[in-house]
Image (cartoon, rainbow, N blue to C red):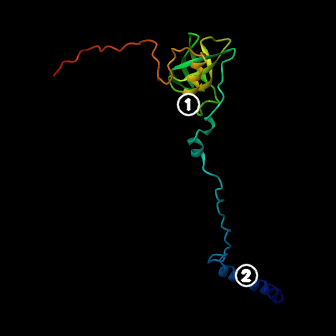
Amino acid sequence: KNEGSRAERPAAAGQARERASERASGRADAQGQRQQPVSRMPKNKGKGGKNRRRGKNEGEEKRELIFKEDGQEYAQVIRMLGNGRLEAMCFDGSKRLCHIRGKMRKKVWVAAGDIILVGLRDYQDAKADVILKYNPDEARNLKAYKEIPDTAKINEGAINDEDEGEEECAFTFDEI
């Protein structure tokens, strides 16, 4: 029995010395438990996140003017309907319900009065898909090239086809 305990003593003494040195070096806490190494967050090497990318539209400075092809038509947005849809008056004379394609959603903001290029559907004449939105300079160029009629108003906001005149009030105001 004595010999076995002697063999264990040097190992126990060695462990005690190791714990004391760990405490002195800061690798162990007061109870002698080993601490986990402190993990550090990696340094950011980029130049900003999502908001930086969202803020600048550098890709749309100068692009080649795209003309309509077969199965496409120029249109002007009458009103936004929500859910990626809008009502547009095509320059061939028909009013169509248009759907903004997924590539344009949340990247290209379409508003009432904008000039757009729509793809016509073979099976539904009353519906179309928005392919491209022209900026005001491109729309003026299309007007100069006689692609869209001169009567088209660029940068005018919402278009009212139903009532062109001023609305009359249903009651009269008395002067005080």
Name the foreground residue: 116 vs 4: 116
58 relative to 95, above or below: below
- Crowd around label 1: few <14 · some 14–19 · many ≥20 (10 Å): few
Residue 161 point in image, percent of width and height:
46, 13
The answer to whether 80 appears left or right of 28 in the picture is left
Callout in the foreground (2, 1): 1
Q: Which mark is residue 128?
A: none
Q: Residue 149, image x and y in percent? A: 55, 14
* The quarter of the displayed image where residue 172 is located: top left
Tell me if mark 2 has few (under 14), some (14-19) or many (20+) residues whose alpha carbon lies within 10 angstroms of its own.
few
Say whether marks 2 and 1 touch (CB < 8 Å).
no
Q: Residue at x 66, y 80 (%)?
A: 23
Is disc 1 placed on a helix, strand or loop? Answer: loop
Q: Residue furthest left?
A: 176
- Looking at the picture, how far across and down is residue 58, in whole percent? 61, 39
Residue nearest the observer in this picture, 120 or 149: 149
> In the image, is residue 26 above or below residue 110?
below
Distance of label 2 from label 1 (alpha carbons): 67 Å
Say above or below: 61 vs 138. below
- Residue 64 location, quadrant: top right
In the picture, the quarter occupied by the C terminus is top left
| Residue for point 57% across, 41% down | 56
Does 108 sit left or right of 21 as displayed?
left
Amino acid type, residue under disc 1 in the picture? Trp
Residue on which disc 2 sits: 18
Image quarter of the N terminus: bottom right
- Callout 2 amino acid: Glu
Give the residue number, with chain letter if any, for mark 1.
Answer: 109
In this view, 26 is above or below 7? above
Question: Which sits earlier in the primary sequence, circle 2 or circle 1?
Answer: 2
